[in-house]
Amino acid sequence: MSDSYSDRNVQREVSELETKSATAARLFDIRRIIGGLFVVYGVIVTIAGLAASDAELDKAQGVNINLWTGLGMLLLGLFFLAWLRLRPTAPPPPAPEDTGEGVGEGA
């Protein structure tokens, strides 16, 4: 009897750890990290582009490279975040219910 009890405890603990692991995987999805970083840096570079001086524009042959790069970064970051929202990671499959029948029998 103690073997089946410990087997059920191990199964329960394993299923709890799998659920926690899946939650952590969804929380730290790489799309969230990449999208967030691109949005933050895109905002910073866009602001730098909006505040560009004439001397900076002359260096880039009249092209406001910070503005265009910042807008591109913003769009890419928003794409990653929209992708995460529209196609989230699949939730873990539900653990089979342990009824206690057949555990340790017949072996």
Image (spheres, rainbow, N blue to C red):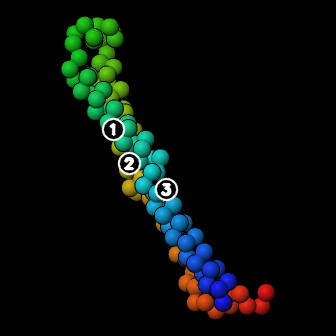
Q: Residue at x 64, y 92 (%)?
A: 101
Task: Give the total of numbered labels.
Answer: 3
Q: Alpha-carbon distance for marks 2 and 1? A: 9 Å
Between residue 33 and residue 60, name the one nearer to us: 33
Query: Furthest residue to the front?
Result: 2
Amino acid at the residue labelled 3: Ala
Amino acid at the residue labelled 2: Leu
Disc 2 residue crowd, few under 14, some 14–19, many 20+, Cα 10 Å? many
Any mark on residue 25, and which?
3
Any mark on residue 18, and which?
none
Which comes before the other along the chain, label 3 or label 1? 3
**Contact flag, marks 2 and 1 (Cβ < 8 Å):** yes
Which comes before the other along the chain, label 3 or label 2? 3
Amino acid at the residue labelled 1: Val
Helix, strand or loop at label 1? It is helix
Residue 6 visible (yes or no): yes
Any mark on residue 81, and which?
2
Q: Is residue 74 left or right of residue 91?
A: left
Helix, strand or loop at label 3? It is helix
**Contact flag, marks 3 and 1 (Cβ < 8 Å):** no
Say which quadrant the N terminus sits in: bottom right
Question: Which residue is denoted by mark 1 in the rendering?
Answer: 39
Between residue 61 and residue 33, name the one nearer to us: 33
Between residue 56 and residue 103, name the one nearer to us: 103
Q: At which x and y percent is residue 44?
A: 28, 29
Q: At which x and y percent is residue 16?
A: 51, 70
Q: Residue at x 55, y 76 (%)?
A: 12
